[in-house]
Every structure is written in structure tokens, then in C-alpha cells.
Image (tube, rainbow, N blue to C red):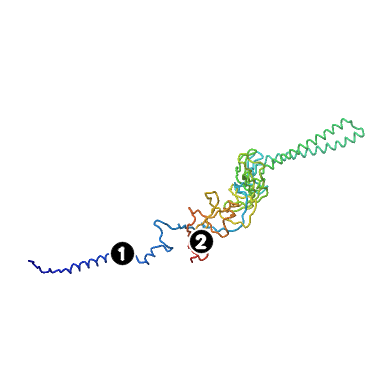
Amino acid sequence: MFLRLPLAPHSPTQPRVLRKNSLISVATVAVLLVGGCSKPSGQEASARPAGGASPAAGARGPQTLTLSESDVTIARRGSMVDGVSITGTLRPIETVDVRARLEGILQGVYVREGDFARTGQLLARFESSGQESELQSAAAERASAEGELASAEWRLTQADQLFKQGAIAEEELRTIRSALGSARARLAAANAKVRSSSLNTRDTRVLAPTSGIIEKRFVEPGEHIGTGGELFTLVRNDILELAASVPEKQANSVARGQKVQFLANGQAFAGQVARLSPTVDPSSRSITVYVQIPNPTGALKGGTFATGTVLTRSISNALVVPVSSLHQSAKGTQLVYKIVRGSVDTATVQVGVVDDRAGIAEALSGVMDGDSLVSGNVGSLGKGMKVQIVGAGGRVPGALPGRPAGGPAGRP
């Protein structure tokens, strides 16, 4: 016998509804997960670089180098000089030590250090009463000797006539002639004494032997000075001279009369080679070159250190680059860093004449007129580095017009 139970409140149709709702919920979650892991095509494009596909993880773009306008030089054509570099200290052409010619007391000193003295100018005076007295005595002796000589000459004339007439003997005539010779000797001695006394009197006046500037004064009025005592040091600086050593291998390039360009105290001066040493110094293997520089206004001072170049030849229309832009490569060649369309590029350069004094060099190849060269001490450089010039209005010197610094070629 079968028992038939009544149906429960939940019919079999309910589980079917629940399964359907569960499927809808799972589908909804899957859609949400997929949406959170993906982006619209527009957002994906904005996350990538403008140049194309996204770079690999850890990759970096070109490094940017910031320079000032003073770090960049434009290669230009100009004139250069080739020569031999020299350095040394400028010395006055003449230095004179003024010394006392006699012993005595200084009555007066009339110049001080730094005063300009002309040739023959009175610098100092000794007390001269003794010398003047000696001069007067010598002059009197000379006058007496002149009178004695005149009398002896007259006596000889008379004796000659008497001897011819036979009035006197020959011995007496010889005695008169001997007396005349003695009178002449006394007059010569008197003249010598007058000259000596005149010199002593003259030497009481200390005169400038040449025109120049009093560098040192060693005495004061009232001092007792011995013969040969040092009074003044006078320098003639209207012409200065420099003695420089030139290596033996360059000695044949220097000749007397060559022009020399100098730089001293930030000012340029010109001179010329006056003399050359005839022999090579065995210790330094060099010769000494003497260069004279006119200094009529005294603008240059003795003892000034100067650098110069003996001009051997002049080069016109040379392509000039700064020495600071030249670098030595690992192969030993010279190279420069150019700025080409906002990026650093390298070029091997053949260098000609180098003017170390002016800091410029002649580029024979590798550089063209108008090239922009990195010339400052800017640290490490590399080919392909981007360049930004501070103070250049956002443009790199040498870049084509209308192209910003660092911009790709062809993009405005």
C-alpha cells in the first residue's frame, strides 16, 4: 500500500530558478573582472610614448646636457700668427749705481725714490771749500810757472844772439836752455794740478749719468761718505728687456729684428729681438734671446712677468677654434664635440698652428666654418647627448632656423 504525501511548499521549480540566478551572478562577476583588467584603446595609447611602442622595462632616453652660452664657441675664419713662445721677467735696459768719487760730507741731497732725473741733473752736493782752495792754489802756481817760462824764453833768445856775437860761452847758453826746459816742466805740473783740483771740485757735485728714475737713495744730508760710497741707484726704463730661453730645436726660427707680441698685466705690448746668445747652454739645451720693448710712457714696470710670442709667420683665413675645445682620443688623435641639431656629435680634427698665448688653434680638417663647438669645462660628454643652452632663447647655436633645441629634424 502506498502512502501519497502532499507536495511541500517549495515546488521543484524553485531549484531551477536558483540555478538560473546563480549563473547570472557568476557571469556578472566575470564581466566585472575582465573590465577591471583592461582599459579602453584611448587610455592604452596615452600610456605609451608618443614615438611608438612602449619601451622595455628599465630603458632610458638620451641624457640632456645643459650648457651656458660661454660653453659654446662658433668656429670662424680669421688671422693667426705662428711663432715661438717665450716667458720671462722684464728688466730695465740699464741700471746705474751712482757712487761718490771723493771723500767728504754731503751738503745736500736733492732727489728721492721715484723722482725722474735727466742726464746732468744735480742729485747731491759735497762740502767743497777744501777742493775750491786747492783749485785756487793750483791756478796761482800755474800763473807763476807761466811767468817763469816767459822769462826763460826771453833769456834764451838773448843768449842766442850773444853767443852768435861771441859775447858768451857755449856753456852759459846751455845753462839758459836747461833753465827754459825746467820752466816748461813746472808749467806742465801746474796745469796737471789745476786739472786735478778742477776734477775734485767738479766731483763735489753729484750729477745724473743718464736719464732715469731714482730707484734707491742710500744717503742723507750731513753724512760723511768715503770714496766709492753708494749714493743712488738709477734705472732707465724707457726701454725694457727680457731674457728668455728658447729650446735648441726652435733656435733657428728666431732671428735678430723679429717682431714679438707680449702680454703683461692684461695688456698687449710689442717688441723685437735685439740679440741672441751665440752658443747653446749645455745644461738646458737652449739659447738665450734678448727682446727689447719700448716703454716711453713708463706703463710697464721693471720686474713684471710677461709672456710673448716671437712672430715667425702670419696665417690669413685660418679656421680658428679654441684650444679648450680640443680633446685627445684614446687613439691619440684630436677630436672636438660639435652641436648638431641639438645633439652632441664628435669629429676628428687635424690641428695646425697653435697659439698658446691667445688660446686658439688652426683646424685643418674635421671642422667647418660656423660649426658650434663645446669649448667649456662641462664634464663628461658623449655622442648623442641632447643639449640645452641656457640663455640662448631655447635654441642651440648652429641649429637650423625654426628648429628648437633638441627637437627632431623636420619637426617645427
SS label for mark 1:
helix
Residue that extends furthest to the right in the rendered view of this protein:
165
SS label for mark 2:
loop
The amino acid marked with disc number 1 is: Val
Query: Circles 1 and 2: CB distance less than 8 Å?
Result: no
Mark with earlier residue (1, 2):
1
Q: Nearer the viewer's eye, disc 1 or disc 2?
A: 1
Q: Is residue 387 above or below residue 13?
A: above
In this orientation, which residue lies closer to the viewer: 55 or 80? 55
Mark 1: few/some/many CA within 10 Å (<14, 14-19, 20+) = few
In this orientation, which residue lies closer to the viewer: 36 or 302? 36
Residue 181 place in picture, x, y as percent: 82, 34
Residue that extends furthest to the front in the rendered view of this protein:
1
Tell me: 1 left or right of 336: left
Marker disc for residue 341: 2
Tell me: 219 left or right of 58: right
In this orientation, which residue lies closer to the viewer: 327 or 205? 327
Q: Is residue 140 above or below residue 28?
A: above
Q: Residue at x 24, y 66 (%)?
A: 23
**What quarter of the picture does the N terminus occupy?**
bottom left
Residue 287 place in picture, x, y as percent: 64, 43
The amino acid marked with disc number 2 is: Arg
Tell me: 395 left or right of 305: left
Marker disc for residue 350: none
Residue 407 place in picture, x, y as percent: 48, 63
Q: Is residue 126 above or below residue 410?
A: above
- Tell me the residue that label 1 is attached to: 34
